[in-house]
Image (cartoon, grey):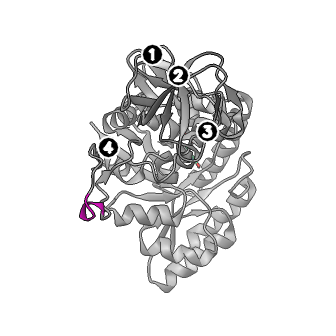
Amino acid sequence: MLTLNESSTLSPTELAPNPTQFYRPTWVDISARAFVSNLRQLKIFNGPGVDLLAVLKADAYGHGALPLARLAEENGAALIGVSSLEEGLSLRLGGIKSPILLLGSIFPLENFAVALENSLIPTVSSLEAARHLSNIASKKNKVASFHLKVDTGMGRLGVSPIGAKSILEWLPSQKSVVLSGVYSHFATADSDPQMVQNQLNQFLQVRDIVLGLGIKNVSFHLANSAAALLYPDSRLNLIRPGLALYGLSLVPVPAELNLHPVLSWHTKIVFLKKVPLGTPLSYGATYYTAKESEIATLPVGYADGVPRSVSNKGFVLIKGRKCPIVGRVTMDHLMVDVTGIPVDIGDTATLIGRQGDSVLSADDWAMWAGTISYEIFTGITKRVPRVMVE
Ligand SMILES: *Cc1c(COP(=O)(O)O)cnc(C)c1O
C-alpha cells in the first residue's frame, strides 16, 4: 500500500527505489468501499440470474486493475474483462483466479496459445480464428473455451449474424473448443434507443440459433453500463459494466441506485506568491492578472494526465472553493488563482473529488477538455501513485 511521505530530507540510502513511498504530493485515492458498493448495488439492481462481468480493461480505466480485480472476485463478479493478453497475464500473475475474458482482438492468431496456457478466454470473431484456436488446443491436448463476438451495429469487432450461424453450426463437430459465451456491443446505449432495440433484436436471433443447436451453459451478454441501467431486456444472463463500477454514468442513474465515484485526485500547493495587476502567467503569457492576485503553483501537469486543453478553463478545489486554472498547463505544474482564499503552502488541492460541499468530477474535466470521463481516467499517467483507501 502506498503512503505519502511527508519528509523532504532524504539520505542517499532512503533514495533507493521504494514502491511503497512517494515524495511528490500528487496522488490518486481509490476507494475500495465505493467500488464494492457499486458492484454489489449493480448486482442487486440487475436481479437474480444475471451475472456480472467486471470490465477492468486499461488498468481498470486508470484506477489500477489488480486491487480492483481482487475486490471484484471477492464480491461476486462472475468474470473479469480486460482488453489484451498483457492485461490478462498481469492479473494472472497477481493471483487472480476468476475467469478472465479478453475483450480485445488477438493478433496474430498464434497468440491464442498464450491465452490457452494461462486460462484466459479469448474472443473469436471469425471462423478462421475459431479453426485456429481449435488447432492450437488440439495440438496441446486441451479444450479451449471462447466467447463468440457478433457485430450487430458497432462496426468494430465481431462476425456478422449470418457468419455467426456458420460458426455455430460448425461447432458441434468440434472436440477441442467449447463455446462459453456469445456477445455483442452497443454503439448507442447512451443515446439512441431505436438502435439499441435493433441491435438487441439481431443478437436475440443469434441466441436462438445457439439454443436451437442445444449448446448449453452459454453466457449471452451485450449490456454495458448504460444499457444495464436503462434497458432491463438487454441484460440477458450477464451484464458487462465498466463505468458504473467506477461510480459514473453517461445516463441518468435509477433512483434506487447510489453510485459513488471510486477515484479522487489530489495534489498540494508547493509555491505561493502575491503578484501585481498585469502579471503574465505560464508559457505563451496567455493570461495576465486583472488585479493584484495570489497565485498557487501545483505540482501536476499534462505529463500526469491533466489535459493541456483545460488551460485557462478548468478548476481545482482548495479549502472547498473552486479556483480557476490560470495560464497554460505545463508538463509538471499548473497555476491556480487563490486570491481571497486563506491558503498556505501544503494545502490540498483536489482535481477530482470532494472538499466539503464542493465536488469536481471526471465529467467536469471531460466537459472542459471536450472529451468523456473515460479519457480523463485513462489519461492519468503511471507516475501518479494510486493509493487504496478504506
Ligand atoms: C469497455 C467495454 C465495456 C464497458 O463499457 P462501459 O460503458 O464502461 O460500461 C463493455 N463491453 C466492451 C466490449 C467494452 O469494450
> The magenta stretch spans which residues?
11-15
x then y, percent, for residue 62: 49, 47
Question: Mark 2 against mark 4, which lies toward the viewer?
Answer: 2
Q: Is residue 11 above or below residue 37?
A: below
x then y, percent, for residue 159: 70, 58
Circle nearer the N terminus (2, 1):
2
Based on the displayed image, in which of its 4 quarters is residue 149 positioned?
bottom right
Amino acid identity at mark 2: Cys
Q: Element at badge 3?
A: loop
Q: Element at badge 2?
A: strand
Instruction: Name the side, left or right, on which 196 lies relative to 262.
Output: right
**In whole angstroms, how far apart are the C-alphas of marks 1 and 4?**
30 Å
Report the residue that reaches farthest toward the front. Answer: 276
* Viewer-nearest residue: 221 or 359: 359
What residue does disc 1 label?
341
Q: Are marks 3 and 1 in contact (CB under 8 Å)?
A: no
**In whole angstroms, how far apart are the C-alphas of marks 2 and 1?**
9 Å
Q: Are marks 2 and 4 in contact (CB under 8 Å)?
A: no
Number of residues whose C-alpha sits closer than 10 Å to that of mark 4, classed few (under 14), some (14–19) or many (20 or more):
many
Q: Element at badge 4?
A: strand
Based on the displayed image, in which of its 4 quarters is residue 172 positioned?
bottom right
What residue does disc 3 label?
329
What residue does disc 4 label?
388
